[in-house]
Image (cartoon, grey):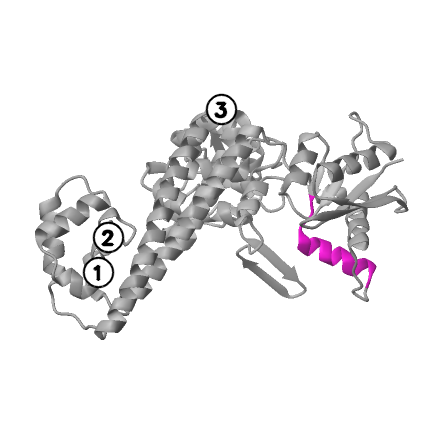
Amino acid sequence: MRITCGIDWASDHHDIALVDHDGTLVAKRRVSDDAQGYQQLLDLLADAGDSPHAPIPVAIETPRGLFVACLRASGRPVHAINPLSASRYRERRRVTRAKSDHADAMMLANILRTDAHEHPPLPADTEQARAITVLARAQQDAVWRRTNLVNELRSHLHQYYPAALEAFAGRDEGLHHVDALGLLAAAPGPRAAARMTQARIVAALRRGGRVRYFEHRARQLHEVLRREHLHQPPLIEEAMAHQTKALVAQLRVACEAARDLEQATANAFDAHPDAAIYRSLPGVGDLIGPRLLAEIGDDRTRFSDARALKAYAGSSPVTIASGKTHRVRHRNVKNRRLNAVGYPWAMAAIHTPGPRTHYDRRRATGDLHTAALRNTYNRLLGCLHHCLREGISYDDALAFSSGIQVVGDAVAVNASASRLEPQVPRASQHLIEAKRVPRGPHVQDDALTSRGINVDPGTTGRVCLRSPHSVRA
């Protein structure tokens, strides 16, 4: 008899429900969120027939927490059900919208009983990969907090201290730069800044953390700070200066936290076995690499193919078709952390030949800058999935090579393309038989060239030449 378990979690207690293959309630209990409660859960599962060889799967609406960590460490399948999906299941069983903790636990257990194949378990990532996830997300959160503080400080300075905004308006010297933090700590108001001599500015820069070119930078700042600007009344300006000191102190702490977490994340990333594969891809460094590994993990069975990874990252569009309506739009449901990495990664990658050629080709076909970057990111994710699956390093000549050359009725597939994708010969033959090969400078969409056959649209695109008688790469 197959048993499934549902847990409706809370901050201090959890409701447990066990159901059999017919949906009949087998056992229920409320346990506390501590070691004693976890032991009660294990006893409840053991009484229902749980064993190391046939563990009872568990459904819960969160992938985090000590309870989930202990359940994952025990080796049993843990299915993190999306709360939106759970609410739809609840409406399927009760149209009255009645709700209780026990009913929610039973609903989660029934989800596993009927639709476990639609809700895969949490990935079996190694402890090392999960540690990188913690550090990379913490570093990303620290950067976001720093950005929020910089925006708050900029908005505040705009109200009474335009000289500071002018002094640190450069692209490489924002308000989080050590020069800005040092100067604003020494002169939080425009009147105090205008009275500063070059020697005092040099001292402020030294305290802020600058290590060279003090006199040159001090002369620049001295000139800007002594220009004529509008002022608030003295008492208002003094009050705003106190607020600036508080914001600068918070921003300094946020900058130090981001730097410390960046170093810790880079060290943990370098110790991971997959680091060499990630670093082989263009544009991947000490920040992008750990963030990619943190969200993708090192469980090779997590994504069945490259399309699953692209959908998870939100780099591939989603089709909405119903009746006469047919729309293709961006994905709202995605891993937002992984999606946030995409554009910086693509921006860094297009400085290398292969991604740059792909980006320029997308722009030539009418894509705007953002759309071309998104497509480049989508392409790079496919390359990353292939490299991780095969355990090989990225090769620009293979990833963006010319694979299929179509001349008349002949199809030439080079050896590297055949090794890259076993489906290439079948895809190329389909292109010839279906007469979908463009005969001019204009090219077709990747999805159209592969429609009607069981071939990943990216397969055809990755191995084809761009020429008057070829399919777009």
Q: Given this view, does label 1 or label 3 mark the residue nearer the observer?
A: 1
- Alpha carbons under labels 2 and 1: distance apart: 8 Å
Q: Specify which label sits upstream in the sequence, 2 or 1.
A: 1
**Residue drawn at 49 percent across, 50 percent down:** 445
What are the residue bounds of the magenta stretch?
A: 80-94
Q: Are marks 2 and 1 in contact (CB under 8 Å)?
A: yes
Disc 1 marks a residue whose amino acid type is Ala
Within-10-Å neighbours for mark 1: few <14, some 14–19, many 20+: many
Q: Badge 3 is on which residue? A: 273
* Picture layout, residue 458 above or below residue 230: above
Disc 3 marks a residue whose amino acid type is Pro
Question: Left or right of 186: which side holds 434?
Answer: right
Q: Specify which label sits upstream in the sequence, 3 or 2.
A: 2
- Considering depth in this image, is 74 or 91 the residue closer to the camera? 74
Q: Specify which label sits upstream in the sequence, 1 or 3.
A: 1
- Alpha carbons under labels 3 and 2: distance apart: 40 Å
Q: Position of residue 425 (x, y in %)?
A: 55, 32
Q: Badge 2 is on which residue? A: 180
Q: Is residue 296 visible?
A: yes
